[in-house]
């Protein structure tokens, strides 16, 4: 493995992403956790760029770092009065789960370690958005339309749920 | 040709997935649990995009799938948050260990 | 008629089923069901018996099981002995059914009693028409069950419960012997059929040792059922059952089953001198042994019970001395007069409500029917000339003498003397002298009780005349007809044997009269030499206590050891398993806390464990 700029970029991005994840687990305040995760999301966008997926990287930044994080922050703010500190769950459970997660990661790592795959030259980086556009509007047209329906349903569902519960709350 | 092996990307995705999993299973705040799930989805997306480039038959399909997954994740986040708000108004708490409706 | 003989056992079975199903509704009317059904059996039996006089034996069987080359059959057989037994059993059963109507009147479980009687009668009738050893064994066990139920009829009485259990277990010890003998015979001859076994024995296909062994094993079964010496203790205890039961089981049927078995298997026994000698010795010893105990007992039914044991010993002695006819003849006469004695004793108990003869006395005038009938029975069993017992006993004595066992002959003679003595002791103490107990409400029994006694009384007098040295030996000739292995129809013995038998029985009666009737000799005369003998006799030679100290104690020791294993080893394991499962359950229920996160965590840990196992084993589980 040669020490190239690409490799350096990958290492930095990976490090930031993992540090963001670890901070998510270890920070005390909920808002801080979400902010830590923004770094992770942006690093993942960088990873996408390394993987010749510029369009996906852009969408990642827009949706995750932007929309979803903002939604979560709103959620946190709306429930703020009851946002107490963490660290109340049983240590036993945490230790047990940690072992389980480590075991799981170890097992999967055995599977992906030295993944025997031949690298084939690709042209994904050339006009990436255009290629995606062609795929979506030709090969994946119907799934694409379904996604739009799904988003609509989710939107209406979210509104109705919030509203009905408000009514229920008033009745109480 | 890239100087980074596919395993590196897969390993990164694995680590992020494990972090998200651990967070989803241990955190008390429901919002953080939701965010952890988003992190797991992201790890999966990394895999998709990785295989779109390094797979035996590289194609744009992997990236399209990643986009679809993001759309679904966005919808999931919206609905999840709506459910969270509804629960919060009813129980005045966001702590997941106080939500034991399934026991009744 | 003989081809329909299989119907005979079915009538009581029908009665049993009907009473079982509708007994509660029928109440005491259930008696008529039982009486009618046994009457039908009796009528059929008489028809079969008379037909058998003129026609050859009839055997009918069909294949029941076929295993390889061996086929097991089931069916029925009517030969001389079977026909005679059918008649005896159904007659006594019918009379007992009739008698019980009066005796059991007012009992809360009246229909149940009749149902049990029906079951027992069915088993006994089935036993005597079985054509092969296996079927015999099945009915043999069924008879044991019936007797268990009947002896334990008053199950709320501790003694009755214990007696029923004792009867069951003691006879079971014998049954094991019978079973082993049966299996050995099957092993050697490949058949359970009597005829095939006998022809194999005759052809010399079985070694002499094996014949002796199987014969003795089968005899052990007979010892258990017929209450012979080592296994006799259950019979007196079985007197806890209702008195009609004692008459049915302990006079005519179940105890006779042992004698019947030996008689049926007689060709086998006849092939082995050792086996015959064993049978004769055990029989003679039992006869004198039980008679000596009967001398001092004070319970009216126990005296009769020991007398039964003693008389059964007589029959065994006869069979063992090659006196086939004598044994069967005595079986028949004994069935009549002993059933009569038991029924009469039941009538006395019914009248005075006690079984202790010390509290009776002077009942002759009060029981106008019972007393003379009891006297007839007593005379018959004592061997007074011209009554049935005289002839059959004489046959046995002749058989013992001709069989070449002078010692056994002397023993039998002494036993005859004792029999006469204790039977008349019983008679004098119950019916003569002054009333010793509370006898204000003494009354004669109803007609349903006296009538059966009357029939038996007549039979007790005349049944001996079917086989006498004076008027021809009709029964004997008929019994051995067509089968020379069974010996002669009648044995010619010296005339002095008959005189001796008469003398000893009269002497016994005279002595009993002197002591208990005229009271010119002190009652303590017998035990004058010291109380030791009396005590020993009164406690039945301490056989029960001996068993208690040896067999029971050892069994108890083993039982305690096994109990120890059960409690600490097995119980410990069980408790451990229970505790483990309980802990698991508690943990599991704690996990059901309704929190989705916990559920997910558990599911994930399971997945993680599986994944790790897969990763470590490379996807294979060797």
Image (cartoon, coloured by chain):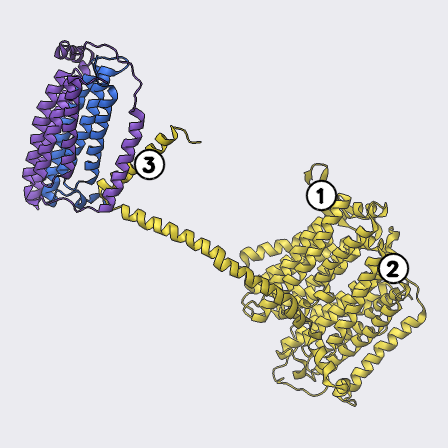
The mark nearer the N terminus, 3 or 1, is: 1
The subunit letter for the residue under badge 2 reads: C
Chain ID, purple in image: A
The mark nearer the N terminus, 2 or 3, is: 2
Quadrant location of the N terminus of chain B in the rendered image? top left
Q: Give me the residue at 49% from left, 59% from top.
A: C567
- In the depicted view, which residue is nearer to us: C206 or C91? C206
In the image, taking residue C370 as reference, residue C54 lies left or right, namely right
In the picture, residue C319 is in which quadrant?
bottom right
Counting other residues with Cα less than 10 Å from the Cα at mark 3, is it few (<14), some (14-19), or many (20 or more)? some
Q: Do labels 1 and 2 touch, CB within 8 Å?
A: no
Q: Which residue is mark 1?
A: C73
Q: Which residue is mark 2?
A: C474
Gap in Å between the C-alphas at discs 2 and 3? 93 Å
The location of residue C232, given as percent across then percent down, is: 70, 67
- Residue at the outermost front position: A3
- Tell me how many marks there are: 3
The location of residue C587, given as percent across then percent down, is: 31, 48
Q: Do labels 2 and 3 touch, CB within 8 Å?
A: no
Q: Which residue is mark 3?
A: C609
Name the secondary structure under disc 1: strand
Chain ID, blue in image: B
Counting other residues with Cα less than 10 Å from the Cα at mark 2, is it few (<14), some (14-19), or many (20 or more)? some
Gap in Å between the C-alphas at discs 1 and 2? 33 Å
The subunit letter for the residue under badge 1 reads: C
Chain ID, yellow in image: C
Name the secondary structure under disc 2: helix
Counting other residues with Cα less than 10 Å from the Cα at mark 1, is it few (<14), some (14-19), or many (20 or more)? many
In the image, taking residue A46 as reference, residue C407 lies left or right, namely right
């Amino acid at each position: 493995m040669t020490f190239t700029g690409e490799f350096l970029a990958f290492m930095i991005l990976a490090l930031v992403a993992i540090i963001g994840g670890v901070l998510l687990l270890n920070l005390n305040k909920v808002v801080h956790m979400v902010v830590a995760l923004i770094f992770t999301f942006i690093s993942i966008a960088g990873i996408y760029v390394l993987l010749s997926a510029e369009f996906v990287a852009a969408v990642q930044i827009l949706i995750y770092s932007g929309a979803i994080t903002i939604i979560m922050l709103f959620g946190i703010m709306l429930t703020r009065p009851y946002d107490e500190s963490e660290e109340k769950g049983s240590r036993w459970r945490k230790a047990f789960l940690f072992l389980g997660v480590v075991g799981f990661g170890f097992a999967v790592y055995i599977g992906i370690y030295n993944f025997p795959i031949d690298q084939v030259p690709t042209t994904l980086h050339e006009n990436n958005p255009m290629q995606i556009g062609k795929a979506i509007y030709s090969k994946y047209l119907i799934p694409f339309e379904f996604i739009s329906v799904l988003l609509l349903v989710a939107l209406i569902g979210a509104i109705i749920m919030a509203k009905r519960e408000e009514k229920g709350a008033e009745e109480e | 040709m890239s100087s980074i092996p596919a395993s590196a990307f897969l390993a990164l995705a694995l680590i992020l997935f494990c972090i998200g999993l651990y967070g989803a299973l241990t955190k008390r705040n429901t919002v953080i649990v939701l965010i952890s799930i988003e992190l797991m989805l992201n790890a999966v997306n990394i895999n998709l995009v990785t295989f779109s480039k390094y797979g035996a038959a590289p194609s744009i399909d992997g990236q399209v799938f990643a986009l679809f997954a993001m759309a679904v994740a966005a919808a999931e986040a919206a609905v999840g948050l709506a459910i969270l708000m509804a629960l919060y108004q009813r129980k005045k708490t966001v702590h997941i260990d106080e939500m034991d409706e399934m026991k009744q | 008629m003989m081809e329909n003989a299989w119907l005979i056992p079915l009538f009581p079975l029908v009665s049993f089923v009907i009473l079982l199903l509708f007994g509660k509704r029928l109440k005491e009317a259930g008696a008529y069901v039982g009486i009618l059904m046994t009457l039908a059996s009796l009528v059929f039996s008489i028809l079969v018996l008379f037909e058998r006089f003129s026609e050859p034996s009839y055997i009918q069987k069909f294949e029941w099981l076929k295993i390889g080359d061996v086929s097991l059959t089931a069916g029925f057989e009517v030969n001389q002995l079977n026909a005679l037994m059918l008649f005896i059993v159904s007659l006594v059963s019918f009379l007992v059914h009739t008698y019980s109507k009066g005796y059991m009147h007012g009992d809360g479980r009246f229909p149940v009693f009749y149902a049990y009687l029906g079951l027992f009668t069915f088993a006994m009738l089935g036993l005597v028409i079985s054509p092969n050893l296996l079927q015999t064994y099945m009915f043999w066990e069924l008879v044991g069950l019936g007797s268990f139920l009947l002896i334990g009829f008053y199950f709320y009485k501790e003694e009755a419960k214990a007696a029923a259990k004792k009867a069951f277990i003691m006879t079971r010890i014998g049954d094991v012997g019978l079973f082993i003998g049966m299996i050995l015979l099957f092993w050697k001859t490949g058949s359970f059929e009597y005829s095939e076994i006998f022809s194999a024995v005759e052809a010399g296909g079985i070694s002499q040792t094996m014949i002796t062994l199987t014969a003795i094993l089968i005899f052990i079964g007979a010892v258990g059922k017929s209450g012979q010496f080592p296994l006799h203790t259950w019979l007196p205890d079985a007197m806890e059952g209702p008195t009609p039961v004692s008459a049915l089981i302990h006079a005519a049927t179940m105890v006779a089953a042992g004698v019947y078995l030996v008689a049926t298997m007689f060709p086998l026994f006849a092939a082995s001198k050792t086996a015959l000698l064993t049978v004769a010795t055990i029989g003679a010893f039992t006869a004198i042994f039980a008679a000596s105990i009967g001398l001092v007992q004070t319970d009216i039914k126990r005296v009769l019970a020991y007398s039964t044991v003693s008389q059964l010993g007589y029959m065994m002695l006869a069979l063992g001395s090659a006196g086939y006819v004598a044994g069967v003849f005595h079986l028949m006469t004994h069935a009549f007069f002993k059933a009569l004695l038991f029924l009469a004793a039941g009538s006395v108990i019914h009248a005075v409500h006690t079984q202790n003869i010390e509290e009776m006395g002077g009942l002759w005038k009060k029981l106008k029917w019972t007393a003379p009938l009891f006297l007839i029975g007593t005379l018959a069993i004592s061997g007074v000339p011209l009554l049935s017992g005289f002839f059959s006993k004489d046959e046995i004595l002749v058989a013992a003498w001709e069989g070449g066992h002078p010692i056994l002959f002397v023993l039998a003679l002494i036993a005859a003397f004792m029999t006469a003595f204790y039977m008349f002791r019983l008679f004098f103490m119950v019916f003569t002298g002054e009333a010793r107990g509370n006898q204000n409400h003494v009354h004669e029994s109803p007609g349903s009780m006296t009538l059966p006694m009357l029939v038996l009384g007549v039979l007790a007098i005349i049944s001996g005349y079917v086989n006498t040295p004076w008027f021809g030996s009709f029964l004997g000739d008929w019994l051995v007809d067509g089968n020379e292995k069974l010996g002669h129809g009648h044995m010619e013995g010296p005339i002095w044997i008959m005189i001796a038998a008469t003398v000893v029985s009269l002497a016994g009666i005279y002595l009993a009269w002197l002591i208990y009737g005229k009271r010119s000799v002190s009652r303590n005369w017998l035990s004058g030499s010291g109380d030791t003998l009396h005590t020993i006799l009164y406690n039945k030679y301490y056989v029960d206590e001996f068993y208690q100290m040896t067999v029971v104690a050892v069994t108890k020791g083993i039982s305690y050891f096994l109990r120890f294993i059960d409690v600490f080893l097995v119980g410990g394991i069980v408790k451990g398993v229970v505790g483990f499962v309980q802990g698991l359950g508690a943990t599991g229920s704690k996990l059901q806390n309704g929190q989705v996160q916990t559920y997910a965590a558990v599911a994930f840990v399971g997945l993680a464990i599986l994944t790790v196992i897969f990763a470590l084993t490379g996807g294979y589980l060797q």
